[in-house]
Image: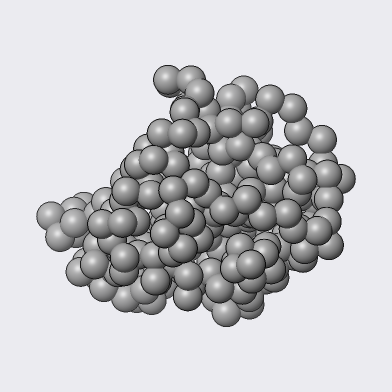
């Protein structure tokens, strides 16, 4: 009987599970992303973890969102002989150097309007009281440095959590859908790293569509040039369901969002201070 596989994490987890399942080496079932689990799910979820043979998790803090689904808490539920592999939360902004994830300290589940990502050019404009995004002109060296910073942050997360290594693949500057929605090729690389950690030689099979391609962010042309990457047709935000998303609407709605939430602006400026300085957004 094939070993039972359970993959726990955010939206990347289900895509990773599907790739691992494509090898034919496991039995598994789809579960909800960890941020959607509630106390009412603990019955079936605890039972599932208890019969899991291979647990793959992103780093999850104990009592995440008030539910005991932290990585260490899940490992404590595993049966004797079960194996655990840690994977990093994948993020890479080398080709999208101004995009960021910023959590509202007053409501960490809240996203900004129109698209669920922040733009540091809009954030900087809000901080300066402007009504249009700041328009910096970072040098190619600064843009390459920004990409290197993103890779180094991944390396730090890998070392901190003893996770499989994906940072070396990021040095090839893969073209992702958004800064935290990797392309299939990156996900396949990580799945292969998981298999290697388990001493399994099977190969993953890619689906014929991009699993996390529901929303495509624009690729920064200057960053692509600086990194030697050729990308076509990625000049605007685009939804798989609704098509192109109006840039002016993003600017207008997100500036208003920041006006009503100065705490988010302050938090974002502190959290991304190094990136903001490197990209010349403070000048």
Determine whether, in the image, residue 67 is placed left or right of residue 165.
left
The colour scheme of the drawn protein is one colour
User: Quick one: 190 or 79, which is closer to the camera?
Assistant: 190
Quick one: which residue is furthest to the bottom in this view? 160
User: Quick one: 172 or 158, which is closer to the camera?
Assistant: 172
Determine whether, in the image, residue 147 is placed left or right of residue 57.
right
- Above/below status of 12 relative to 217: below
- Above/below status of 48 relative to 150: above
User: Quick one: 19 or 252, which is closer to the camera?
Assistant: 252
**Residue 209 visible in this rendered orientation of the protein:** yes
Determine whether, in the image, residue 149 is placed left or right of residue 253.
right
Residue depicted at x 44% and y 42%: 251
* Res 24 → quadrant: top right
Quick one: which residue is furthest to the right in this view? 228
Residue depicted at x 34% and y 56%: 258
Quick one: which residue is furthest to the left in this view? 40
Residue depicted at x 31% and y 65%: 262
Residue depicted at x 61% and y 63%: 281
Q: What is the number of callouts on the image?
A: 0
Q: Position of residue 228 (x, y in %)?
A: 86, 45
Q: Quadrant of the C terminus?
A: bottom right
Q: Position of residue 160 (x, y in %)?
A: 57, 79
Q: Position of residue 272 (x, y in %)?
A: 53, 69
**Residue 1 visible in this rendered orientation of the protein:** no
Q: Position of residue 45 (x, y in %)?
A: 25, 55
Determine whether, in the image, residue 35 is placed left or right of residue 281.
left
């Amino acid at each position: 009987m094939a070993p039972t596989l359970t993959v726990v994490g955010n939206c990347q987890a289900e895509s990773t599970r599907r790739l691992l399942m494509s090898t034919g080496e496991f039995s598994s079932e789809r579960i909800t992303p960890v941020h959607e689990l509630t106390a009412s799910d603990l019955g079936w979820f605890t039972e599932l973890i208890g019969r899991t043979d291979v647990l793959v998790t992103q780093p999850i803090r104990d009592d995440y969102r008030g539910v005991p689904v932290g990585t260490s808490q899940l490992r404590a539920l595993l049966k004797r002989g079960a194996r655990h592999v840690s994977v990093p939360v994948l993020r890479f902004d080398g080709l999208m150097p101004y995009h960021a994830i910023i959590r509202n300290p007053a409501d960490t589940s809240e996203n900004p309007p129109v698209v669920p990502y922040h733009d540091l050019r809009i954030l900087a404009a809000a901080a300066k009281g402007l009504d249009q995004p700041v328009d910096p002109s970072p040098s190619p060296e600064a843009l390459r440095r920004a990409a290197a910073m993103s890779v180094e942050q991944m390396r730090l997360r890998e070392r901190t959590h003893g996770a499989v290594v994906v940072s070396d693949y990021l040095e090839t500057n893969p073209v992702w859908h958004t800064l935290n929605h990797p392309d299939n090729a990156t996900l396949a690389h990580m799945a292969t790293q998981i298999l290697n950690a388990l001493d399994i030689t099977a190969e993953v099979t890619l689906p014929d569509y991009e699993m996390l391609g529901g929303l495509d962010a624009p690729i920064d042309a200057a960053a692509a040039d600086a990194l030697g990457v050729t990308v076509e047709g990625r000049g605007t935000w685009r939804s798989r369901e609704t098509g192109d998303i109006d840039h002016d609407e993003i600017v207008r709605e997100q500036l208003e969002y920041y006006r009503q939430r100065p705490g988010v602006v302050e938090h974002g400026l502190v959290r991304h201070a190094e990136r903001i300085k490197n990209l010349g957004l403070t000048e």
